[in-house]
Image: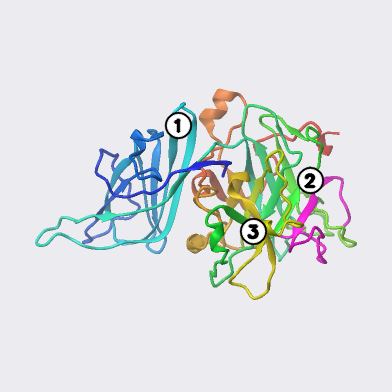
Amino acid sequence: MKKLIYAMLSVITLGLVSCDQFNEASDAQNVIGQDVKVSLWTKAGTRAESGNVTFGDDMLISMDNYTEGLHYEQKFSGSECVVKDVVPGVYSISVSGTAYDEDGFPILLMANIVNRPILASSASGSNQSTGSEISIEVKGAQIGNLVFSEVYYCGSNPWYFRDQFYEIANNSDEVQYLDGLYFANTDPIDFNKVLPIWPAEDEDGYVYASRVWKFPGEGTDYPLQPGESCIVAQFAANHKLPTFNPNCPIDGSQAEFEFYMNSATYTDQPAENMLHVFYDGSAEMGSIEMYLTSVFGVGLMVFRVPEGVDWDPVHDSSMSTTNLGSKYGTLYAKVPVEYVVDAVECVRNASYNDSKNFPAIMDGGFVTVGSSYLGVGVTRLVDEEATAASGHVKYKDTNNSVNDFESGVVPVMHRHSTAPAWSHVNQ
């Protein structure tokens, strides 16, 4: 979920090291568990410890069989591990942890693979498992300074969706400026789980945005101090009012920014307006009156274009593309993965784990509230140890939303972080 600095590849069998006992979520009877062998390699195929990175002692592998409700989670050190007695089935597998470059700079690792079968097999004439091997790509990213700390996307009963909001927090020990930061969303995956098809020459270098916005400011107009956050609302009004939806859980008038679409129906609120950048190849907003992300879930990201780089998906045709699997010809902005500061992928429900838009380096997992119009959202977990050490709130950030977020919570604006001093709510 952070700015990409370089990649490392392949989780593949190499050998065994001593690992902690694997935690099972199910007591399967009369099933021969399989030993899953794992080893981390660099892209060049050299051992990580003898290459230009060293793997730390906080490596974590998670395996989830959503069909059978099985969850395995194991910590290990270095680049090798063996996971014992895994019940055969189809798994989503993720790997995370910290590596260090030659100068000791920390690199956050992330890997993800879905629908990986672990087959049932045993040695002839015995109950010993013959084992299984996996191969999965892992990449490294710098730990980011700005993170999504709360997302409320599903709307409230009955069928009300104007109350969506997104909270972005400073997760560092230094002031961070929102000026010029981009906000974008992907298209949601449809009910048939049909993934888009992007140009093959792009490989894994881009993520494809349906609509792009930008924070206003000239460079230092909108600072976020450590421990502060800002709210960006779809419509920054008090949604609890009878005019809107008394069942709504939030008062959106507390938001610092809103996505105002020049609507005649939904009037401009006191919150600062986000700047519209891109939609279907144009800088124009289009004909709809409100900016709506899918109540079923959507990929969200904030990114920053490097200084001196001219990123213009409206006028530069190389920075936009169509979904090659669609007949509609809609244009999407191509966002280089290395620009991404933070990302979180919200999916319809846990069964959509195999239908992610984001590469693992941006978000190795996903979040979900399971349905729509529930009046609940997702909130990032606080890192209690880091918070105590720094004296201000610090959030958990492993690049895997499964680990970093709590789902199904009643949304609260500025739940853990405070509003910035320049917020209109403080005037």
The three-letter code of the residue at mark 2 reads Phe
Q: Which residue is mark 2?
A: 257
- Report which quarter residue 220 is drawn in: top right
**Residue 28 in the image, given as x and y percentages of width and height:** 27, 58
Q: Of residues 414 and 359, which is closer to you in this image?
A: 359
Q: Of residues 135 and 307, which is closer to you in this image?
A: 307
Can residue 239 be spotted in the picture?
no
Task: Compute the Cα span from label 2 to label 1.
Answer: 38 Å
User: Regarding mark 1 in the picture, which secondary structure is present there?
Assistant: strand
Q: Nearer the viewer, mark 1 or mark 3?
A: 1
Q: Which residues are magenta?
A: 267-293
Tag shown at residue 322: none
**In the image, residue 385 lies in the stretch drawn in magenta:** no
Left or right, 267 with reference to 57 = right
Tag shown at residue 101: 1
Q: Which residue is mark 3?
A: 186
Task: Compute the Cα span from label 3 to label 2.
Answer: 20 Å
